[in-house]
Amino acid sequence: MNILSLFVLIPVLTIIGIILSRSHNMVRWVALAGMFAQLVTAVVLLFAYFAVRNAGNTDAMVFYQDVEWFKTLNIHYCIGVDGISVAMIMLTGIVVITGILASWEVTYLQKEFFISLILLATGVFGFFISIDLFTMFLFYEVAVIPMYLLIGIWGTGPKEYSAMKLTLMLMGGSALLMVGLLGLYFNSSTDGHYTFNLLEIAKVHIPTNLQMFFFPFLFLGFGVLGALFPFHTWSPDGHASAPTAVSMLHAGVLMKLGGYGCFRVAMYLLPEAAHELGWIFIILTTISVVYGAFGAIWQKDLKYINAYSSVSHCGLVIWGLLMMNKTAMDGAILQMISHGLMTALFFALIGMIYGRTHTRMVDKMGGLMKVIPFLSVVYVIAGLASLGLPGLSGFVAEMTIFVGAFQNPDLFHRVATIIVVSSIVVTAVYILKVVGGLLFGPIKNDEYLSLKDAKWFEKLSVGTLVIAVAGVGIAPLWLSNTIMDSLTPIVERLSQVW
Amino acid sequence: MIQDIPIQYFLIVSTTMFFIGVCGFIIRRNLITMLMAIELILNAVNINFVVFNKFLFPHQLQGHFFALIVVAIAAAEASVAIALFINIYRRFTNIEVENISEMKY
Amino acid sequence: MTNYAYTIWIPLIPVFMFLILGLFGMKMKGSLAGILGTLGLLTITVLSYFTAYLYFFKTGEPEGGFQAITAYNIEWLAFTDTLRIHMGVLLDPISVMMLVVITTVSLMVHIYSIGYMKGEQGFQRFFAFLSLFTFSMLGLVIATNIFQMYIFWELVGVSSFLLIGFYYQKPSAVAASKKAFIVTRFADFGFLVGILIVSYFTGTFDFDLLTSGDGNIFQTIGAASFMGVSAITWALLLIFMGGAGKSALFPFHIWLPDAMEGPTPVSALIHAATMVVAGVYLVARMFVVFHFQAPGALEVVGYVGAFTSLFAAVIACTQFDIKRILAFSTLSQIGYMILALGVSEYGDEAGVGYMASMFHLFTHAMFKALLFLGAGSIIHAVHNNDLRNMGNLRKYMPITFITFAIAWLAICGIPPFAGFWSKDEILVAAFEKNKLIFFSSVFVAGLTAFYMSRLFFSVFFGKKQHYHHEPHESPLVMTFPLMFLALASIVAGFVPFHDLITSDGKSFETHLNYSIAIPSVAIAVLGMFIAFLLYYKESKVPDKISKSLGIFYTATLNKFYFDEIYLFVTRKILFNCVSQPIAWFDRHVIDGFMNSIAWAIQKSSFKMRDLQSGQVQQYAFVFVSGAIILVLCFAYWLN
């Protein structure tokens, strides 16, 4: 039994456990235990991965397993990981468990809530371990669909509208993706033995004109999920309406599927087109980065601010990928991890604050530092991570991207780099504006004086995330090197001349 | 004697009947008239059956029998249809086809 | 060769203190936290002094001058094969000197704060932040590479942000902390781009390689230029932009006066003695590169310094808040240090500007910290910042009075106090390189004497105020640092800087240049005398003078409206003209476009639904007409 299959198996068992549970308390403990087992598996995987690599294994994918699933179309259940997927799996493990903790007090249709949440997590885990493009797509859909229910049923505000919008836009992305995947499939071989296997497709050279045709489909398809401008508008509405844990998972992990797919599928398999068409997407993502940051300044709703900030940061992910050298791509992947942790932390805190003050409007709150110091201090830490303070994860990722991007010698990349670098100033502006308005200053509403600070599960949830953020920020070398090594085949293929 | 009449004459009559029926079915709004139009169509077909049988296979009777079956089914259909019409009339107090759109969506 | 590996503990002890106080501070008694923090700092002060002793006197000066020693280096992050960030300890004359300055001032501020912050809410938090700041600042000065410096640069910025906003319930403090952070952040953006340019061309971050004399590493940059200016000049100007932001040089000076919203010990530590000289330190660190690769950039540095010193001195003459006067005075003195670097040459006596700048940094740290702590002591007694509400305090607070007087004489440049020696060297350096800067500096010396004397006389002499509470002398825990720093302000001038800290590490001889020293002292005395006439006794003359200056006075009082300009640019232009339209555009145009797609699909689906009306007659009509058309078509085609 391959360790990777556990990542799909454990959630399924957990779901069965939840169905069999009899009380509210039992449901959440089962969910927590299941996801804790998942996290432990992720940690074990991490060490197993290092052990395998240290033993001298230099395969592109390790823990490889290939089971034929649907013979006629040559679809396989084919799994394997490299350093990047291991890092993403760790990230997912952490975010999911903190998400479960953050939704500890959900009581309305509790069983169904946790089942959907874990189903979503299954999709994400499955996506990251897949090598076969069809299974990858399948898990992608598994991750997206529960989102509709989670927002539509447990959300707040205009939840049906937001859920519909989010799902439809992501489905639109999936449709593009499907076209691209089929394009890859039917060009994966010249003798009619078509395959969905990523590694197999990487061995053939798809004709340039076909690459140029299918690249936009794949890149946009994944880009929609990665909040690529101008297909990002599902993000503010979706996040604003979603319940806490869903926002965390969605911004923290699901949006990373977009960036991950962009380089793992689109850029890896269609390298020439990536070079030829990259400039269009560089322009779009440059806009994303600056635009998201400026958009965030004007927002009043905490979740909107964070959603726009996510647009900016996820734009940076794809932007870094498009710089197409090892350093920048390494930075982009670090940024995925960093943003995943950071934004999960943000949404967790926003949910907790909202649960206390019953408003998310910055201008209605103020002086929360005085009454809920723990949450406020963590909020400040999250803010500082977001604006790229050294010692926290955001800095490492951003700097790696910037240094990498600057290695491109032409003027176009230079100008784009400088524009993107300037976003760190704008980020500081909106973060400090929020921190100043929300936590500092006099208390505006006397009702807030009686607020209670974080409970144990809230402390555990945000504490885990803070430790992860600081861990990546203080000692980034091992993570960075792991990712860097795994990027080698991708970068080689990108720089290969056909 | 019937052999003296050319086949075209029969066909002209049946075609005319058929199109009168089709027009009636499309144009009229009253369910009973529509049912009558359907009867016209069926009978046009019956004429064709009988005539072709007579002219093509004079020693066989399939066409005749088929016409008889059609007549029987038409009778059954008319009785079911009229039963429906009566029920519809009781519910909506009319049998105009355009007014009965409750189950459309 | 002495093993300096233990120096890694100098930054590490404060960071442990920060973690202990930050995580468990709430459970401690306030005084315990204060004592713990102070003890931690005492340890590293001893270590720093020991290091300085070892470095300057034990390892000593070999043939080729003082050598830079990399005492510790560990890889932190690797970008490419050559671009790697290390975290380490670099010991060379200026970093060792900065270690001494930072730990001394920080220790004094710690001791002082135990008294000053007594009973304040968040006492533990205050000491945690102080430790964090000390850690970041130490990390900055011992940086082995420019990226480590940038990292700690940002950390210093954030601890400054936290400390300015210490009274977080006060809106003005929150605004000031935000402003400080954002302005310096903007400058850091330039710093970062500068680092990117330099690292791209040279392929390294290490100071060792960057500042090695031969400059081979810059060969590749040679022809690269942008807008007629060479790439290295741009890079260095951008790096200097970062330094200007942190050191509050014109035009990034606006955050420093507002930063006085923080507790006074913070102002003494961060916004007078240590953090704000980071920019000077940065230019000094990169001095070799500036001097050999981009003399043009160095010239800009000199002019920015000279202008800042003049500009700030003029404003300082009109302010009433004593902490703000000191803040502008700090600006002016930092301008001095920067201009000294700007006019310096490399090597031997020509490098006097470099030495003078470091010398002034050293002396200024002592007497400016003393001035701020003295001001804190005064504010503590009077519960007010405004000069007009003070007067005749010498009777109530004798120790503060005497120590303040020493600092006052030091900053005015009266021999034999510390300021005189360092300022004199700066004037010598300026005189030899650039006469314009020289005359401006001499004028600033006079202005400095004037506004400091104005402050001094108004506070300790002048009219007899009627105080709400009888002011009384501060406790020993606060006056001890004053006395210590007063002593330092006297003796600091006699430290033989020309033997220890020079541009090329080799010592040289300096002489007191009487033709410069005497006029500069004379002009300082003149300034003091004018202030004596105007402010020693209560009089109406100052008001009359300010009235007669009219618009110039008003403009100066309002700091030449720079705050308003910045506010206009951020609020009106960036917020209202960029951010708001973008937010609107996003919600209405882009989102509207997406929504309209959905709307169009829905509408067309309603239209299409009409095709399936459920009316059999309609279907029959379509069916029949279709059949007829087909028949006609077949009839036509088959013929």
Image: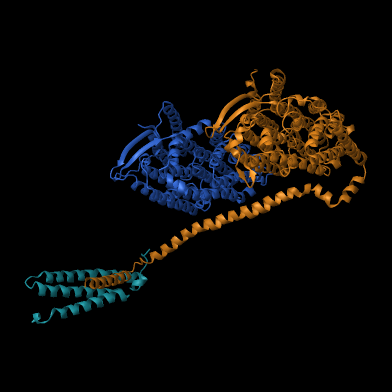
Q: Which chain is cyan?
A: B
From the image, state the color of chain C.
orange
Q: Which chain is blue?
A: A
Q: Position of residue A456 (x, y in %)?
A: 55, 34
Q: Can the viewer see residue C102 in this picture?
A: yes
- Position of A291 with respect to C128 (left or right) is left
Tally of numbered discs: 0
Q: Is residue A46 above or below residue A147?
A: above
Q: Position of residue C265 (x, y in %)?
A: 75, 33
- Position of A249 with respect to C296 (left or right) is left
Where's the N terminus of chain A, which quadrant? top left
Q: Position of residue C560 (x, y in %)?
A: 78, 48
Q: Position of residue C593 (x, y in %)?
A: 50, 58
Outermost residue on the left side: it is B59
Of C532 and A187, the residue lying toward us = A187
| Residue A367 location, quadrant | top right
Q: Can the viewer see residue A427 in this picture?
A: no
Q: Is residue A213 above or below residue A4?
A: below
- Position of A374 with respect to C480 (left or right) is left
| Residue C79 location, quadrant | top right
Of C191 and C132, the residue lying toward us = C191
